[in-house]
Image (cartoon, helix red, strand yellow):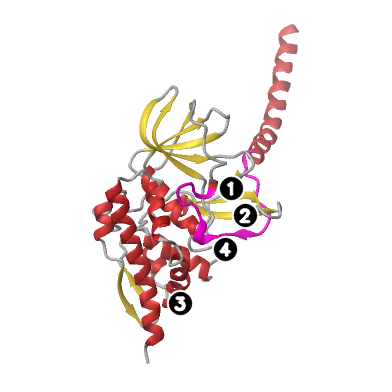
Amino acid sequence: MFQAKSRNLLVSLLLLLIVALPTFAQQKKQKSKKKAPSGPAVLWREPTDLESRDLLLGAGGEQMKPNLRRVTFIEKKSGGYSTKYRVKDASGHEWVAKIGKEAQPDTAANRLVWAVGYETEIAYLVPRLTIQGKGTFENVRLEARPKSINRGEEWKWDNNPFTNTPQFQGLKVMMLLINNWDIKDSNNVVLAARNPSTGTPEQRYIISDLGGSLGKTGGIFSRSRNKPIDFIKSNFIESVRGDKIDFNYGGKSKSLFENITVSDAKWIGALLARLSDEQIKDAFRAANYSPDEVLAMSQAVRRRINALNDVSASLAEAP
């Protein structure tokens, strides 16, 4: 009789568990879902202070710089080309440390994209950094993970709220300007944040990973990243056919760049032309390039800016 009661109790418990499991799994799934961001979608803001923007410090400025007195390891991040660690600085702020070949171009490209009004990550390049529990590394890019900003889903290059706007077309030209060949949706993210002026919620559409830049876009076997000589020597504009510009690009998502017009070049070219030579140099100084590399790469960027504006000027002068 005792065994029968025990068996009945066991069966009852099993039945309860079977009933509860789907509910538990559903609750867990709902919990794991990222909260959908609210507020208007923002890709670009008018850079009214463009001529005075500090490209050494970038979007975070002096106030967001990491406290490097002690940086401790939290966890290793998976995925991507580079080694990445989640770390905490001496002030308790969390960062993603990117180590390796992509750290420098990611930082310099971040500065140039931010300079003309696009939303970006807050990032700094540390020439030499000791991460407690991991070791000492050269040229580490630290990317902020502030608690006030929630990271949402990726956004798509071919389906987003900005398609065919001057701002989105200008962003594509910026990718060509820096020779970013790694154009894929997984490098993009929507940040749920608050408007810096009004404090109201907004969705910031950013390109989080720009590490595949400042080399040559080439073919699948000849692409490079963080190779100044390749960047300096590579062509930018191949030809102009009617109002369409044919760029020298052999990277991913090539079709994305087939509908860029002279008007698009004029829009972004006018913004870029407002940058001084020193500001452009600061973008590369921020990434700890050598003085010779800073000069040569900034000159290459200036040539590309001039090419954009020369194309629009020549079309305007055509009979």
**Distance between the Cα atoms at labels 2 and 1?**
9 Å
**Distance between the Cα atoms at labels 4 and 2?**
21 Å
* Mark found first going from the N terminus, 3 or 4: 4
Work out whether residue 292 or residue 312 is closer to the camera in this orientation and state it. Answer: 292
Going by the image, does 243 lie left or right of 250?
Answer: right
Q: Which residue is tagged 4?
A: 48
* Mark found first going from the N terminus, 3 or 1: 1
> Which residue is at a point 32% across and 66% down the rendered structure image?
303
Q: Is residue 271 magenta?
A: no
- In the drawing, what numbered circle is on residue 152? 1
Q: In which quarter of the image is the N terminus?
A: top right
Percent across and percent down for residue 68 are: 48, 30
Q: Which residue is tagged 3?
A: 263
Inspect the image, locate mark 3, and give the three-letter code of the amino acid beneath it: Ser
Q: Nearer the viewer, mark 3 or mark 2?
A: 3
Location of residue 319 by image quarter: bottom left
Q: Does the magenta stretch include residue 52?
A: yes
Q: Which residue is tagged 2?
A: 203
- Callout 1 secondary element: loop
Residue span colored magenta: 32-59
